[in-house]
Amino acid sequence: MAATTGKEPAGDPDDAGAARPAGGRAPGGGTADSGTAGARTPGRRSADGPSTGVRSTGVRSTAGRSTAGRSAAGRRRLIAAAFLLPALVLLGALVVQPIGYSLYRSLFDRSGDVFVGTGNYRELLTDPTIRTALRNTALWVVLAPAVATALGLVFAVLTERVRWGTAFKLLVFMPMAISMLAAGIIFRLVYDHDPHRGVANAVWVGVHDTFAQSSAFPKARPGRDSPLEPAEGGAFVTRTPVRAGVPVLLPLVGVAPEALPAGTRTAAAAPAEPGKVTGTVWQDFTRGGGGRTNAVDPSEQGFSGMRVEAVRGGRVVASATARADGTFVLPAAADGALLRLPGSNFREAYAGVEWLGPALVTPAVIGAYVWMWAGFAMVLIGAGLAAVPRELLEAARVDGAGEWQVFRRITVPLLAPVLAVVLVTLVINVMKIFDLVFVIAPGAVQDDANVLALQLYRTSFGTDADQGLGSAIAVLLLILVVPVMLLNIRRLRKEGSR
Amino acid sequence: MSTPAAVGRLAARAASGAVRVFLVLAALFWLLPTLGLLISSFLSPTDLNTGGWWQALTAPSKLTVTNYARLLGNDTITGSLLNTVAIAVPATLLVLVLGSLAGYAFAWLEFPGRDWLFLVVVGLLVVPVQVALIPVSKLFGAIGLFETTAGVVLFHTAFGLPFAVFLLRNFFAEIPRELLEAARLDGAGELRLFARVVLPLGAPAIASLGIFQFLWVWNDMLVALVFADSAHPPVTVALQQQVRQFGNNIDVLAPGAFLSMVVPLVVFFAFQRQFVTGVMAGAVK
């Protein structure tokens, strides 16, 4: 941040907290720009410069007056107390007091009566569910902020090059405004396992099926008294060898009529052809009943496209594909062989990836988080980018640097402070992540998707609550954010003493 | 014939083409999830059971508002939206009032311990709400605020205050001293000074803060899960209770989620600038 205030009156005590005579310091003068990162106090910056000098004079006059009398100082304290008290009481009772209580409560057992010392903390490290939560939280902290920041950086840089950059930014930033619950519902649908419902799997299966044809008859099987028997690899094979000139019947059942491939026609009995093996493979089932077993009845459907192989001594000697009416013709080589319907005909349709299964659920929820927060990173980084001097980039380009080099050597280093703030913010945010996991992870995999904040909720409330252990998790969460707390305080003190 | 310049131009054009393709793909990634739920919310349960929302792209006649009609006739959901309003509005106003009073005190009033007290407030910025769930539920239980709207409002106010005080104190501190001095010389008391000078000048920051806090509270689920009256839950909790049987009731969840998003999205689009300012200042919260 380029804003400069900081013209302090001479002799100003360097640090906050030091004892000083009443009125000895310009109120707020020095820390005026202690906003975080891009946190520009809105508007009114321009009025700042000229007023600074006047402000110092003002300070002196206050200092002069403050010696006037004790009662005046007392009155001012009273006024200050009146202004501050409501906020301080709430903060004290609902934010500060709980920190102390959590520390205290974490040393007692479930009932709250028995002192267990560090017992709850030891349990944090040994309980397998909590360990999963710890591991997942670590994964979150490593992955989510980094990915969101990287995407935000890329978006911020690239949107400057297209005319619709603003619209793009709006689209990516919008999820910031909605609740994690709504985002959770949105992604619950995206990740739905049914490829006819979840778009992630629909795309995945679509891509997969482009390269690996799925079969049309996943549930087909031989019926009663069938001439076919199951064989290795999900195949079905005839019990007896076939003869040229004798039409073969290969009846199967179990395919839903609406699942049959397009172009299927009514099955036909294959005519005998001398010197060739002919036959029919079809659905031996008449809707509404009345069909004869192992015979081609008038309303039964052929298995169009079914692969038929003739096997002799374990080797495929001939093969054919059934026509729309289920008939097929094999050359003379098939004479005396067994006919096999290979397993490839019956492979289950590819069901896609189980996004919300135990293995992938955490990365999947992290994906939803990145969807929500990349916009935050993008906007903050975009604001930082606007402050990067264009001449610097131009000069580098003139010197022959490629776009990548400009990005890598100039843009990123200049943005480093902003990137750091974004990362730290997201890390803090991610440590507390609760809603998204709670909503997206189905009940059965919540143990696998577990994170600290979720575990805290599950441990502390509900039927089997253990608030001692819950408090220990709360303390752990607090300890995790303490470094950032100190960082904030230090930054403020530094700005205050500038 | 390709001169080096022509090759360079070609390369530049290819690169800008790649940028466009990448951004279009990214835009789809950001658009499709929401669009999918939006379209789903306009499909009948039967259609939702037989196919994906994308069926509506080829058969727009399948779109219907019956889900919304049924949802609006459902008292639990409409009531929960009102409960959310009853929590979010007071929690926002309280933060604004208490936050600006304290912000003013930290910026312009003199009292012992002011600086270290402010540092404490800044330290509280990052305290996770989770730390307070158990202790405050005990406290509220003892004073009869557990499972009441007032309890939820107070909790949100308390956890909104550190940021409010931090933001407003920094903003108020920028007000030119001579303005305040002039008012003081005219005999204005601190309260009058606060109301007549500080509040009007601080309006932009107060607006940003208000929008930020309002969205924060509106979108909250965790605090409401623990502290809200289970008979009168806000919309996030009411919907969350439906999520358990996700596959079976998308026809409730999808329109419900959108109803819950209407207000935040309107606020977002109407006050984009202030929202961005609030978010930027809220970094590190």
Image: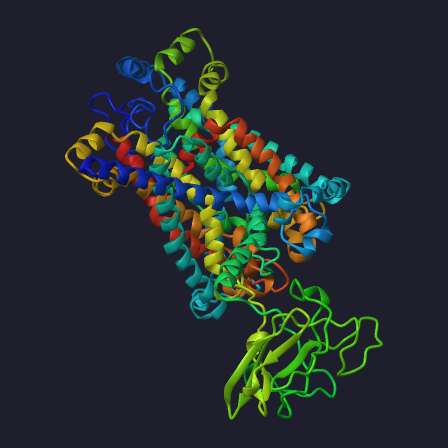
Q: Nearer the viewer, residue A111 or A212?
A: A212
Residue at image x 35%, y 11%? B178
Say whether residue B38 is left or right of residue A62.
right
The extreme front residue here reads: A274
Find residue A99 and report its horizontal and vertical position in percent.
Answer: 46, 49
Please, is residue B7 above or below residue A334 in the view? Answer: above
Find residue A418 and report its horizontal and vertical position in percent.
Answer: 31, 38
Find residue A83 and report its horizontal and vertical position in percent.
Answer: 48, 26
Residue at image x 55%, y 58%? A441
Q: Nearer the viewer, residue A27 or A488?
A: A488
The extreme left residue here reads: A399
Please, is residue A175 above or below residue A191 in the view? Answer: above
Residue at image x 52%, y 55%? A203
Q: Quadrant of residue A440?
A: bottom right
Name the quadrant of the C terminus of chain A.
top left
In this rendering, does residue A36 appear at all? no
